Amino acid sequence: MIKINEKRRVLVFLGILALGIECGSRTSSGGRGVQESPAPGPVEKIIITIPPDSPQLERITVEQVGTADVSENEVVAPGRIEFDISRVSRVSLPVPGRILHVLVRLGDTVAAGQALLTVDSPDADAALSEYRQSQAAISQTRSSLAKVKADHTRALGLFEHKAIAQKEVLAAENELAQANASLVQAEAACEHARRKIDILGLEGEKPAPYLTVKAPLTGKVIDLSVTAGEYHNDMSSPVMTVADLSTVWVTSAVPENAIRLIEVGESIEVELVAFPGELFSARVKRIADVLDPKTRTVQVRAELANPLGRFRPEMFGRIRHSHERRTVPVVPARAILRQGPEAILFVERGRGRFEKVPVTVGAARGDQVPVLKGIEAGDRVAVDGVMLLAGMDVR
């Protein structure tokens, strides 16, 4: 009886062992199945169909995709028009005085040397008087020098005939040296006085009832802060500003990681908010030596020709500079549907049939947007009625 029970227990143990091995094998096989991911299937195409006789189809305009050269390494940064400081002059009064006449108005174009305003100034009269006195001093000193020279010559003659002592000759030579020194001093004083009246724009030979302030350069009067009748004694404060706007600066803060793409002397493109769709060319003149630690940008300054005066300081826009160009498809900006970070085009696949295609786009160039991935040149895409097609997209 005991032997039979032991035999049963052995059989039960063997059965349990076999069942455990089978379960382990299935578990192992199942684990390998979870780790192996099935191959991804093709992305489902979304086709929107509009019946050929539907009036909605007439609201959709289709154009063929063209191409353009774009850059793979491109710098795009905000820009601003500024004065060329080397072509700006802030006009101040050279001497204190009362304004008699203001001869220009704000916005007037003036030529270099043109009269801007007249001033009645006692200092100008004093400068003119000093110059004339210095001229008179030179004439008097020259007359004295001529007499001293004659006395010196006579003393030498008398000394040769032993008619006077040697000490009298030495005294005459000393007087001659002093007279020559006086003439040098008088001429220096006269030159100083002459330079002063030249700066003031006065003429020493003519009386000056008033002082005329002239334009230092050719340009426009962009600021005017003086009127006739005012008395000004602050010569450090400008009364008007004249600027030559035939050339202006375009300044831009270029990101640190893109500054390597710009060099002094290179040409850059400029787009301005005031002139949408137009591109202008400027030349880089200076790149700052110091990085702005707050914005992590470097200031770039370019020179932009402004012969027609279209560009005004403080106009905003952006600069663009590129390297390594390649040809890619381009589409009108209105053809692109933005859905969050995704850009969508509707590509025509037949009459009334449009495929919704995600694309990768680059920076817009005017009204054209380069498409880096998703379509090819020659495809036909919807450019008008895009929102209508978007409303028909049901999934």
Image (cartoon, rainbow, N blue to C red):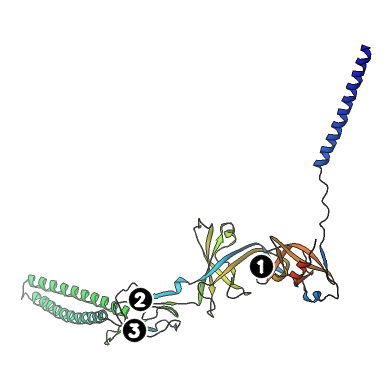
Kind of residue at disc 3: Ala
Secondary structure found at label 1 = loop
- Are the residues flagged by discs 1 and 3 in contact, CB closer than 8 Å? no
Q: Which residue, given by chain and number where applicable, does mark 3 sit on?
A: 228
**Which quarter shows the N terminus?**
top right
Q: Earlier in the sequence, mark 1 or mark 3?
A: 3
Q: Is residue 151 depicted above or below 265 in this figure? A: below
Kind of residue at disc 1: Ala
| Nearer the observer, 175 or 43 | 43
Q: Which residue, given by chain and number where applicable, does mark 2 sit on?
A: 92
* Label 1, label 2: how far apart the Cα atoms are: 47 Å
Observer-side mark, 1 or 2, equals 1
Near mark 3 (Cα within 10 A), the count class, few <14, some 14-19 or many ≥20, is some
Judge left or right: residue 211 versus residue 108: left
Residue 328 pos. (x, y %): 73, 66
Near mark 2 (Cα within 10 A), the count class, few <14, some 14-19 or many ≥20, is some
* Label 1, label 3: how far apart the Cα atoms are: 53 Å
Q: Which residue, given by chain and number where applicable, does mark 1 sit on?
A: 364
Q: Is residue 268 depicted above or below 193 in this figure? A: above
Secondary structure found at label 3 = loop
**Is residue 12 in sight in this rendering?**
yes
